[in-house]
Image: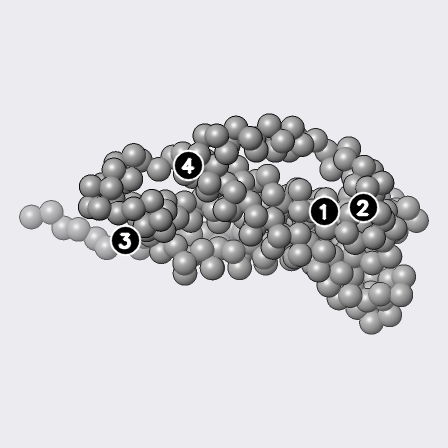
Amino acid sequence: MKKTTNKKRFNFENYQFLSVFTVLIIFALWQIVSNNGAVSEVFIPKPSQVWSSFITTCTDGYKNYTLFEHLLASFERLGIAFLLSSVTAIPLGLISGTSKVFRAILEPIIEFYRPLPPLAYYTLLVLWIGIGNESKITLLFLACFAPIYISCVSAVVAIPTDYVNGAKTLGANKIQIFIHVILPACLPQIFVGCRTAFGVGFSTLVASEMVAARSGIGWMVLDASNYLRSDIVFLGVIIMGITGIGVDLIFRFIEKKLVPWKGKV
């Protein structure tokens, strides 16, 4: 009889040390490059400078606002835009997935503006709506809307017809089919679209805060770059990256709780 040995199976958590190791390597390289004087501090500041700027912006602030207030201003704009895009894009995308007529009406508009750079139409939004938060929120709304809409349409189209036909055979009406078949089958893809949309919206923050803004993490980075404050620029980029990862982890946690069947059907 062959003797078997129990081997520990590695999952994602077992490989997290590789992620930590990668971050440490990047930080070490950053420290070495910035300390040996090969590159000017204008281009690559020392980690100690970035840390000092972090402490300063948290306590004294940058241009009359603390780092937390800059983050809060950005997340207020992005949060409103993301919420509005979710409550409109999800139902419109699901309806478009089930109705070719509805899809034919909306898709030309979405496919026209989706590949455009945000700055290409932001100037028009400023002319139409003004330089206040309304134009910024509208720009972020448009940036978030397309990924969610497209994910919803793709999710509905990808549903096997056997699922719908089976529900009809059991006597389900259109509303019951939508609630009990289409929506649960689309939820995983909807979350993917929301995560993608938030990432696109986050990357559009700088563009949305270019005009007449006095606060926001994107504005802080843009303003600091005008004065060659690379320490503030690095700080803003790092903070945006960390907060983006944090929000994405929250999305994953909610998805795991609401869509436990993902990958099992």
Q: CA distance from mark 2 to mark 3?
A: 63 Å
Look at label 1 and name its amino acid: Thr
Q: CA distance from mark 4 to mark 2?
A: 34 Å
Q: CA distance from mark 1 to mark 3?
A: 54 Å
Instruction: Tell me the residue at 72%/56% (across/down).
Output: 77
Task: Single out the mark in the foreground, 2 or 3.
Answer: 2
Mark identifier at residue 138? 1
Element class at badge 2: helix
Instruction: Tell me the residue at 17%/51% (across/down).
Output: 4
Callout 1: few (<14), some (14-19), or many (20+) C-alpha neighbours within 10 Å?
Answer: many
Instruction: Name above or below for residue 58 compared with residue 228.
Output: below
Mark identifier at residue 98? 4
Q: Closer to the N terminus: mark 1 or mark 2? A: 2
Look at label 2 and name its amino acid: Ile
Look at label 4 and name its amino acid: Thr
Residue found at the very far left of the displayed protein: 1
Quarter residue 204 falls in? top right
Element class at badge 1: helix
Using residue 167 as the reference point, say whether residue 109 is left or right of it: right
Which of 46 and 37 lies nearest the eye of the viewer?
46
Mark identifier at residue 7? 3
Which of 259 and 40 lies nearest the eye of the viewer?
259
Instruction: Name above or below for residue 161 compared with residue 264.
Output: above
Q: Closer to the N terminus: mark 2 or mark 3? A: 3
Residue at numbered disc 2: 129
Circles 4, 1 touching at the beta carbon (< 8 Å)? no
